[in-house]
Amino acid sequence: MKKFKITDYKISRPKSFNLKSRKTMIPLYYEDNKDYKDILEDLKEENFDLQNKLYAHDRFSLLLIFQAMDAAGKDSTIKHVFSGMNPIGVKVSSFKKPSDRELDHDFLWRTTRKLPRRGEIGIFNRSYYEEVLIVKVRNEILRKYQKLPKDLTKNLNSVWKSRYKSIRDYEDHLQRNGTIVLKFFLNISKEEQKERFLRRINIPSKNWKFSSTDIEERKLWPKYMKAYEDMIKATSTPHAPWFVIPADDKKNIRLMVAKIVNTYLKKLPMNYPRLPQDEKAKLLASKKLLLSEK
């Protein structure tokens, strides 16, 4: 893989973050399709070994959050980057429109139930961040469906500020308890989204991926971009950073995400458990018995 600097995509200074200055297309990290496959396979093999160590060590967990506009590549990124991992230790959760039961709880409740256990990698395809994205852009959702006391929704700016604070506190709590949180915003251009929507319409096998509501959301593009920028500014922290990934090339997304996950897994101080002497003696005894079998 060509020289890759995580710091180019990690939002370390959120106060000065400007989404318009972020490119959606960059020079590719691969030469051709074969090179892409070779790089991705190498990263997947290494990440498979690191995942096994994470699972055996049983002290840390990894939470990966993916947010993006429709057709940005969340599903395919998750599929291609994590398909080689042991399914026992990887859980993918997709969050769509909240159910009535979920709306009867605070906005963090439904995702909390899906958090990864120690030793696991949890992947959120959308997340509690929808509460400061679609709910912020279409704020009628807040008053019509979210069952909050009226006095709490009088000042919408206060609502978003309090939710940002709840999210920061929540992720801080997770970090203090051994969960590493990495968040990816797949930054697609409006032009590329149009091309992907047209492919979904033109190719029968992809029709199911398209909905007329996608066009309605597309009309709100400027509002969504502002919501994403505000979200990243308010919630990218040292222990739960946002990575803004140029998303106009899907293969590039996959290599970048795989490399970032690889880098953070390597940082974790984890080892395979060491057996005490009496257990080692039992292993040797078992080995002798197996070898003595006719």
Image (cartoon, rainbow, N blue to C red):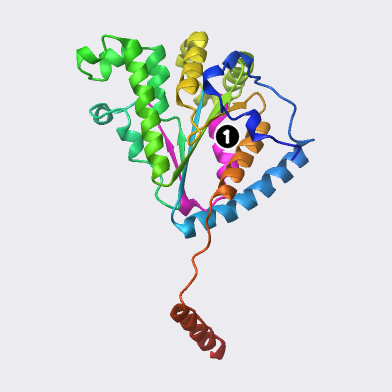
Q: Quadrant of residue 79?
A: top right
**On screen, 253 above or below 210?**
below
- Identify the residue shown where x is 57% and y is 53%: 50
Nearest the eye: 233 or 204: 233
Graded by Cα atoms within 10 Å as few (under 14), some (14 to 19) or many (20 or more), the crowding at tag 1 reads some
**On screen, 85 above or below 21?**
below
Is residue 161 shown in magenta? no
Point out the residue furthest to the right here.
31
Q: Quadrant of residue 19?
A: top right
Residue at mark 1: 76
Split into 4 quadrants, where in the image is the N terminus?
A: top right
Residue 171 horizontal/vertical position (percent)? 40, 35
- Identify the residue shown where x is 60% and y is 17%: 198
Residue 219 horizontal/vertical position (percent)? 50, 8
Which stretch did the figure color magenta? Answer: 69-97
Left or right: 52, with 45 as reference point: left
Split into 4 quadrants, where in the image is the C terminus?
A: bottom right
- Identify the element where label 1 is drawn: helix
Nearest the eye: 136 or 215: 136
**On screen, 132 above or below 157?**
below
Answer yes or no: is residue 250 visible.
no
Identity of the amino acid at label 1? Ser
Nearest the eye: 42 or 156: 156
**On screen, 190 above or below 127?**
above
Is residue 85 shown in magenta? yes
- Identify the residue shown where x is 40% and y is 36%: 172
How many numbered markers are drawn? 1
Residue 101 horizontal/vertical position (percent)? 24, 31
Answer yes or no: is residue 130 visible.
yes
- Identify the residue shown where x is 39% and y is 15%: 136
Residue 148 horizontal/vertical position (percent)? 23, 19
